[in-house]
Image (cartoon, rainbow, N blue to C red):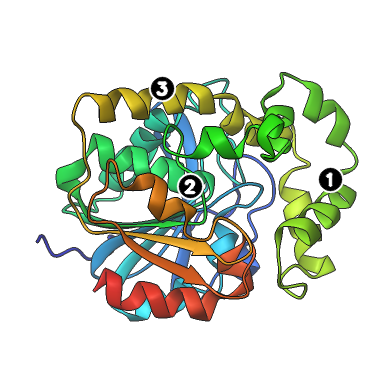
C-alpha cells in the first residue's frame, strides 16, 4: 500500500458558506477549501500516514467527528473530514447531490490534497451513502470501509423511508421541493432541539451550545436547501446502486456495518449482505442515531482494530 504523508496545506481562514468554526479544530488540524468537481469543498485535515476519510451525516458538518479526529490521527493516519457538498463550509451548488457525484467530490479532493493510494473510509448517515458509492466507483482505491447507522439506497433505505409501512416520515418531507426550507427557515434551533431529542438516545450529546452551532451552519444563504438536496436524489441513488448490484456488483474489501441499538441496529448489515457478502456487523448499545456524538469512545473502540 502506498505510504502517504500530509502535504503542506495552508489554513483557510474563512469558508464560503457559514461559520468556519476554526476555534474548534483539534491540535494539528487545519482547514482547507479546494475547487473540485465544479464546486468548492471545505474540510479539515490533520495527522500523517495513510489517508482516512470521515464523511458526516445530516444536519451536521465535519464537526460530527470532533471527538474522534485527534484520536484517529494518533493511530497513524492522515485524517480528512470534508463538509459534503452544500453543507457547512462547502459551497451550496445548484445540483450534483446524487451520491455518485459526491463520491467524485471526495475523490478529487483527495487528489488535489496529494493523498494517493488506497484509503480507509468511514461514513455516517448520508456520509455513509456517499462512502458506499465511493466504494462502488473506486473499489481498488478503498482499503477498508466502515458504514455507521444508515440504510443504503437500494438496499434497505426504501423500506425505512416508507411511512405507509411504519417507516420514517421525514424522508418524504425533506425530498419535497422548497417546502422544508419554507417551514424551517427562522426555526432552525427549535427544529434541531426537537430533532436531536427524538433521534439521539444520549440526552447529553447535544447541549444547547452544540445545537446553536449546528443551527448557525444551517442559517447561511441557501444553507437549508444545500442540506435537503441530499435527500432529493435518494430515489435515483437507489436506482444507481441496484443497477450496479443487478449487474453482478459486490464489494470485496472489508466492510464494517455499525448500527445503533436505538436506531438501525443490525438492519444495516442484514440488508447489505446481497452485495457485501463478507460484511462484519456491530451494534453499539445504548446509542441513538448520532453515534459519533453519543458514544465516540465506543465507536473508536470498534474502528481502531477494524481500520488497522
Q: In which quarter of the image is residue 1?
A: bottom left
- Quadrant housing the C terminus: bottom left
Badge 3: how crowded within 10 Å, few (<14), some, or many (20+)? some
Mark-to-mark CA distance, 3 and 1: 32 Å
Let me know if residue 33 appears in the view: no
Please tell me whether mark 1 sits on a helix, a strand or a loop.
helix
Badge 2: how crowded within 10 Å, few (<14), some, or many (20+)? many
Q: Residue at x 52, y 23 (%)?
A: 235
Please tell me whether mark 2 sits on a helix, a strand or a loop.
helix
Above or below 72: residue 45: above
Residue 159 location in percent, x, y? 56, 36
Nearer-N-terminus badge (3/1) = 1
Circle 3 residue: 239
Mark-to-mark CA distance, 2 and 1: 21 Å
Residue 274 location in percent, x, y? 29, 41
Q: Which residue is drawn at 85% across and 26% down?
A: 182
Point out the residue furthest to the front here.
165
Between circles 3 and 1, the one closer to the viewer is 3
Between circles 2 and 1, the one closer to the viewer is 2
Circle 1 residue: 188
Residue 108 location in percent, x, y? 31, 38
Mark-to-mark CA distance, 2 and 3: 18 Å
In the image, 24 versus 304, the foreground residue is 304
Residue 265 location in percent, x, y? 52, 61
Nearer-N-terminus badge (2/1) = 2
Say which mark, if any, is on residue 127.
2
Nearer-N-terminus badge (2/3) = 2
Amino acid at each position: 500500500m502506498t505510504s502517504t504523508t500530509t502535504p503542506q496545506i495552508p489554513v483557510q481562514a474563512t469558508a464560503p458558506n457559514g461559520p468556519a468554526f476554526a476555534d474548534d479544530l483539534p491540535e494539528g488540524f487545519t482547514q482547507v477549501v479546494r475547487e473540485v468537481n465544479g464546486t468548492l469543498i471545505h474540510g479539515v485535515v490533520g495527522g500523517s500516514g495513510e489517508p482516512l476519510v470521515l464523511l458526516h451525516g445530516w444536519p451536521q458538518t465535519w464537526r460530527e467527528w470532533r471527538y474522534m479526529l485527534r484520536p484517529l490521527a494518533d493511530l497513524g493516519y492522515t485524517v480528512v473530514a470534508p463538509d459534503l457538498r452544500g453543507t457547512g463550509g462547502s459551497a451550496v451548488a445548484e445540483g450534483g447531490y446524487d451520491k455518485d457525484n459526491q463520491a467524485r467530490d471526495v475523490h478529487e479532493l483527495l487528489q488535489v490534497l496529494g493523498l494517493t493510494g488506497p484509503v480507509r473510509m468511514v461514513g455516517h448517515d448520508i456520509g455513509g451513502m456517499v462512502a458506499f458509492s465511493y466504494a462502488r466507483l473506486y473499489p481498488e482505491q478503498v482499503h477498508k470501509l466502515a458504514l455507521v447507522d444508515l440504510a443504503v439506497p437500494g438496499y434497505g433505505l426504501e423500506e425505512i423511508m416508507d411511512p405507509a409501512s411504519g417507516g420514517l416520515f421525514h424522508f418524504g418531507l425533506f425530498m419535497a421541493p422548497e417546502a422544508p426550507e419554507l417551514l424551517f427557515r427562522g426555526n432552525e434551533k427549535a427544529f434541531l432541539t426537537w430533532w436531536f431529542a427524538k433521534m439521539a438516545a444520549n440526552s447529553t450529546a447535544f447541549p444547547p451550545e452544540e445545537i446553536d452551532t449546528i443551527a448557525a451552519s444551517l442559517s447561511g444563504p441557501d444553507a437549508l436547501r444545500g442540506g435537503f438536496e441530499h435527500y432529493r436524489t435518494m430515489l435515483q441513488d437507489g436506482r444507481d446502486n441496484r443497477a450496479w448490484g443487478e449487474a453482478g456488483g459486490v464489494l470485496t474489501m472489508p466492510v464494517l456495518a455499525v448500527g445503533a441499538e436505538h436506531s438501525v441496529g443490525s438492519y444495516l448489515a442484514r440488508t447489505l449482505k446481497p452485495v457485501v457478502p463478507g460484511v462484519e456487523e456491530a451494534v453499539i448499545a445504548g446509542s441513538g442515531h448520532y453515534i459519533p456524538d453519543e458514544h465516540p469512545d465506543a465507536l473508536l473502540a470498534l474502528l481502531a482494530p477494524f481500520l488497522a
